Image (cartoon, helix red, strand yellow):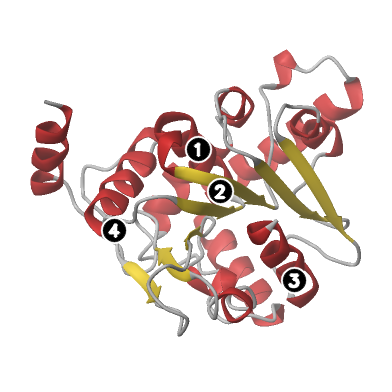
Amino acid sequence: MSRIRDLLDELHEPLLNVSIRSEPPTGADAPTVVLIHGIASSSSTFDFVVPLISQTHRVVAIDLLGFGESPSPDDAEYTLEEHVAAIARTIRHLHLGHFVLVGHSLGCLIGSRYAAMHGRHLDKLVLVSPPVYPAPAEISDPLTRAQVSGYLGIYRFLRKNKEFTIAHAARVAKLLPIEHVMEITETNWTAFVKTLKNCIETQTIIADLAAVDAPVEIVYGRFDEFIVPGSLAILSRMRNVTTHRVEASDHVIRRPMARVVATAIDS
């Protein structure tokens, strides 16, 4: 009965765009890796990772709902549930079998919920640069609570100041080493604002990871501008979780971090 519901769901709800689907030269038995980018981004997020794994893995990169070439339904609220459901539909459609799921930034939050709900498909979950912001009222440490509250205040400001946010994102994008890794435009503004509010400002990654049985590898940069150390420490103490700090790295997956991500995929 659940399979019939899944088929009906795929008929009536949109599938996401698969921006990369590559087969390695080594044959059909290669393991599969699914890549999920972050907010206001695209598969370009993984530009330095894909060459390191494409010779030995089947690589699939999916554009999130409302971003890249994926659809932006008029009635979408871009909740975590909607993002996860769209990812699940697309993965079912691709008939991937077992795979390693890699999420970056927002992709960590979506990937963790997917893993909690559909863990039977996963060999491993790799989270890169996870933005962990528990509800401030639930944080006992004063410094961590102040840091999380500060980030949430910044995000509310960005949502309420469209022209500033689009212009600032364009300036920052010019300084980044990867093209199209940050794009906030008129086209994806609604998806950006609603996703920021419904998935990042309000998130469930801690509870979701507690329900994941697969191994979890967390990779983050020492100078990641979106990391709250006290919040990340909560994840590092969870079962099945291994963390890797990359020196001289920030939130973006540059070459040094890409090498650690590739190693985490294979470890």
**Numbered tag placed on residue 106 in the rendering:** 2
**Numbered tag placed on residue 259 in the rendering:** 3
Task: Determine the secondary structure under disc 3.
Answer: helix
64 displayed left or right of 49: left
**Numbered tag placed on residue 145 in the rendering:** none
- Camera-near label (3 vs 4) is 3
Q: Which amino acid does label 3 sit on?
A: Arg
Residue visible at 46% across and 68% down?
A: 30
Q: Do the residues labelled 2 and 1 touch (CB within 8 Å)?
A: yes
Task: Determine the secondary structure under disc 4.
Answer: loop
Q: Which of 12 and 93 is in front in this view?
A: 93
Mark 4 vs mark 2: which is more N-terminal? 4
Mark 3 vs mark 2: which is more N-terminal? 2
Q: Are marks 3 and 4 in contact (CB under 8 Å)?
A: no
Residue 238: x and y in percent read 74, 27
Task: Determine the secondary structure under disc 2.
Answer: helix
Residue tagged 1? 199
- Camera-near label (3 vs 1) is 3
Residue 120, quarter of picture: top left
Instruction: Using a 10 Å C-alpha cutoff, classify the residue at mark 4 as few (fewer than 14 neighbours), some (14 to 19) or many (20 or more).
Output: many
Instruction: Using a 10 Å C-alpha cutoff, classify the residue at mark 1 as few (fewer than 14 neighbours), some (14 to 19) or many (20 or more).
Output: many
Q: Which amino acid does label 4 sit on?
A: Leu
Q: Nearer the viewer, residue 184 or 27?
A: 27
Q: Do the residues labelled 3 and 1 touch (CB within 8 Å)?
A: no
